[in-house]
Image (cartoon, helix red, strand yellow):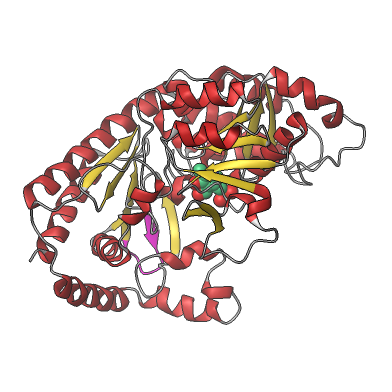
Amino acid sequence: MAEIDWVRVRIILEREEEQFSKSHPRSRRMFERACKSMIGGVPMNWMIEWPGPFPIFAKKGRGSMITDVDGHTYVDFCLGDTGAMFGHSPKATVDAAYRQMLRGITMMLPTEDSIWVGKELTRRFGLPYWQIAMTATDANRFALRVAREATGRSKILVFNGCYHGTVDETLVRLVDGKVEPRTEAMPPPVDPNLTTKIVEFNDSGALRRALEPHDVAAVLMEPALTNCGIVLPESGYLDAVREITHETGTVWIDDETHTWCAGPGGYAKARGVQPDMITLGKPVAGGIPAAAFGLNKEIFDKTIANLLQPIGVNGAGGTVTGNALALAAMRATLAKVVTNTAFHHMIALAKRFEEGVQGAIRKSGVPWHVIRIGARTEYQFREAPSKNGAEAMAAADFTVSRYMHLYALNRGILLTPFHNMALISPYSTAKDVDMHTQVFQDAIGEILA
Ligand SMILES: Cc1ncc(COP(=O)(O)O)c(C=O)c1O
């Protein structure tokens, strides 16, 4: 088994940081200007996590490429951390959005596009009723509220290693058998012991024990974890989740925000299981902010009396939610961008990406592995795939990740900063993928003992 030379990692990381700073003078100047008024020098805090000493400032994103203000062009496998999973500015979405912008962006009135979108979400995801949200965080928050209303219970359950947006009750970890707030996040407004239960993924016994007191409104879960590396469900696990939630009267909310990469109807659909509620966000309107949550007939019947009260303030929605622009973009994206043909291309190329990375890992002998869900591929710094969030999180290595990402960035490849993940868009090419394989191989080659 090959070993990493940690001294070399640090020396080369320094060399790469120097190279980055020298070759991005305009981004550096913009960052310095931004720091005077923007918290952390960026409009959204995740943007500070890119691997260089400052983020690159974007000039243009198109298809699978991004150009920065210093004139560098990158093959983009980050794709806005899934917001642009189907490519930057897909033409059909842009055309529809432009046409709608000339006819009104937000009118606090439904447009005909919403009828088409609702029907299409039902066709794809198998749930009869849908409502629009602005972000996946919102969709999860609203879904939890509906589940609490439907069950008359207040607690929720999530899995160790999860991320479902900035939903307070979900920003937790399992520590010594107890639920604790995530240490990197600001302190929670309410003690998570009062709101949240947490168990490890792929442990149906633990899930059953947690749900048996019948005090949990909803299990909020990704059908495969994607936010601590990828953790796939073991054979029969999703069926067990379906059975246990059903038996204990708990609502199963399936967050498909990332796992939509599995195919046109998401991961659960591809595995033949039907959750009670589904949440979607990020790329659902081609990058224009929009999200959605869907529910089954039973939950609809238990909650609809409240949802349809003439006074609309029921704890979900917001002034610009479901606006005409978002619905036009969703319709065009679902009809013309997120197609079977697009997935065919994306998944075939993601397999090529996986094989390339796998080949380089094997050739170099580093104890890493690579894993894939449809169009999403991720490598992890442990030999075997993780069984749960604890294993996946223990394999994280900030320094090696930073090194691999900066090495790639300096050679024209963007990877999502806080994942070792690559998304393949309908615009990605075999050349893009092979370029990554070569750079990945070279990056490992430089740090072996
Ligand atoms: C699985 C999952 N759900 C929800 C969200 C929240 O998405 P947003 O930040 O767009 O609200 C994320 C964000 O990364 C996510 O990974």
Instruction: State whether residue 49 is above or below residue 212.
Output: below
132 or 272, nearer to the observer: 272
Q: Position of residue 260 (x, y in %)?
A: 46, 33
Q: Which residue is at a point 57% across and 66% down the rendered structure image?
A: 43
Q: Position of residue 145 (x, y in %)?
A: 73, 39
Instruction: State whether residue 401 is above or below residue 239.
Output: below
Q: Position of residue 127 (x, y in %)?
A: 62, 20
Q: How many marks?
A: 0
Image quarter (top left, top right, bottom left or bottom right) of the C terminus? bottom left
431 lies left or right of 154: left
102 or 208, nearer to the observer: 208
424 lies left or right of 107: left
Task: Inspect this view and state whether residue 379 appears.
Answer: yes
Q: Quadrant of residue 272?
A: top left
Q: Position of residue 229 (x, y in %)?
A: 36, 48
The span shown in magenta is 65-72
Instruction: State whether residue 11 is above or below residue 198.
Output: below
Q: Quadrant of residue 247?
A: top right
220 or 434, nearer to the observer: 220
Q: Which residue is at a point 41% across and 48% down the rendered structure image?
A: 79
Task: Inspect this view and state whether residue 83 appears.
Answer: no
Q: Which residue is at a point 16% across and 51% down the rendered structure image?
A: 367
Instruction: State whether residue 247 is above or below residue 321.
Output: above
Which residue is outermost to the right? 310
258 or 2, nearer to the observer: 2
Q: Is residue 109 magenta?
A: no
49 lies left or right of 126: left
Q: Quadrant of residue 215?
A: top right
211 lies left or right of 53: right
Q: Is residue 70 magenta?
A: yes
